[in-house]
Amino acid sequence: MKILFITRAYPPLVGGMQKYASDFYNNYQERGEIKLLANSGDKKTILPFFFKVLFFLVLYSRQYDVIHLYDAVLFPLIPII
């Protein structure tokens, strides 16, 4: 199973969301094929990250069996998926 994991909160930023996202990715990385699209910058990088993800989804989303959006802020991507 191929998984695409998209998160806007990822280390090196520090916090609960970042830890959970890192743990999720590391856990699934041991079990199978998982691709990570993560924003590891601060809030100023969210908009460029969003467009990067949008572009990636348009080109490659059909290659994945599961697309996991980490939080509700990414919900505008659902119609693209």
Image (cartoon, rainbow, N blue to C red):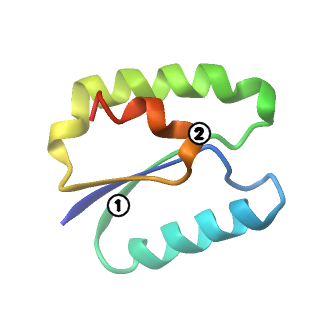
Q: Nearer the viewer, residue 30 or 75?
A: 75
Task: Say which of marks 1 and 2 sits in front.
Answer: 2
What crowding class fits label 1: few (fewer than 14 Cα within 10 Å), some (14-19), or many (20 or more)? some
Element class at badge 2: helix
Residue to which mark 1 is pinned? 34
Q: Residue at x 82, y 62 (%)?
A: 15
- Seen as rendered, the residue at the extreme right is 14
Q: Is residue 47 above or below residue 66?
A: above
Question: Which label is found at residue 73?
Answer: 2
Q: Residue at x 35, y 36 (%)?
A: 78
Q: Nearer the viewer, residue 74 or 12?
A: 74
Q: Earlier in the sequence, mark 1 or mark 2?
A: 1
> Residue 11's spot in the image, x, y percent?
73, 56
Side (left or right) of 3 relative to 69: left
Question: Which label is found at residue 50?
Answer: none
Distance between the alpha carbons at the discs numbered 1 and 2: 21 Å
Side (left or right) of 46 relative to 5: right
Q: Amino acid at mark 2?
A: Val
Q: Amino acid at mark 1?
A: Ile
Q: Residue at x 40, y 24 (%)?
A: 54
Which image quarter is the N terminus in? bottom left
